[in-house]
Image (tube, rainbow, N blue to C red):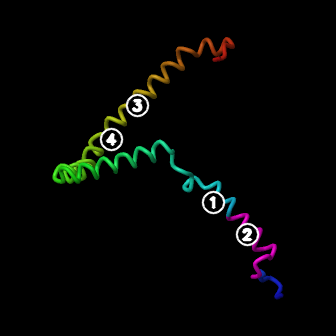
Amino acid sequence: MVPGRLDKTPDSPNRISRARRLLRLFCTCRVLKVIDPPLRMKTVIALLLWTILLAFCWPLALLLLVAWPILWLLSIPFRVIGVVVEALLALVSALLFLPARVLGHRRP
């Protein structure tokens, strides 16, 4: 074996440790996490309903296919407003409960 080169045999320690490192990297990678099963099921149901609509009324299904991204874009400002209102309510709640937390009360 030449010094400095990895051994290419299937059972070499270098290949096994390299495989373990790659496996550990893939297991901790957030991109490869499995999607929520309920979200996956909702997607399958939505696709099934759309194909049924396509079979029964194809112009409405194509209109829905074109209009859905536009409606999603129009809903973005309302989502931002919802996030801001939720953050403000959390801030007010934190300010109201601050004296109790300073005095040592813990949530159950």
Q: Is residue 11 left or right of residue 86?
A: right
Q: Identity of the amino acid at label 3?
A: Val
Between disc 3 and disc 4, the foreground one is 4
Q: Position of residue 53 (x, y in %)?
A: 24, 49
Q: Position of residue 65 (x, y in %)?
A: 25, 52
* Circle 1 crowding by C-alpha within 10 Å: few under 14, some 14–19, many from 20: few
Along the polypeptide, which appears first: circle 1 or circle 4? 1
Q: Which mark is residue 2?
A: none
Q: Nearer the viewer, residue 53 or 99?
A: 53
Residue 11 part of the magenta segment: yes
Along the polypeptide, which appears first: circle 2 or circle 4? 2
**Which residue lies at the image location 33% right of the left edge and 50% below the top edge?**
48
The residue that label 4 is drawn on is 76
The residue that label 1 is drawn on is 26
Q: Which residues are magenta?
A: 8-22
Q: Identity of the amino acid at label 1?
A: Phe
Q: What quarter of the picture does the C terminus occupy?
A: top right
The image quarter containing residue 77 is: top left
Along the polypeptide, which appears first: circle 1 or circle 3? 1
Q: Are marks 1 and 4 in contact (CB under 8 Å)?
A: no
The residue that label 2 is drawn on is 18
Q: Secondary structure at mark 3?
A: helix
Q: Is residue 100 left or right of residue 68?
A: right
Q: Identity of the amino acid at label 4?
A: Ile
Q: CA distance from mark 2 to mark 4?
A: 44 Å
Note whether 5 is above or below 37 in the view shown.
below
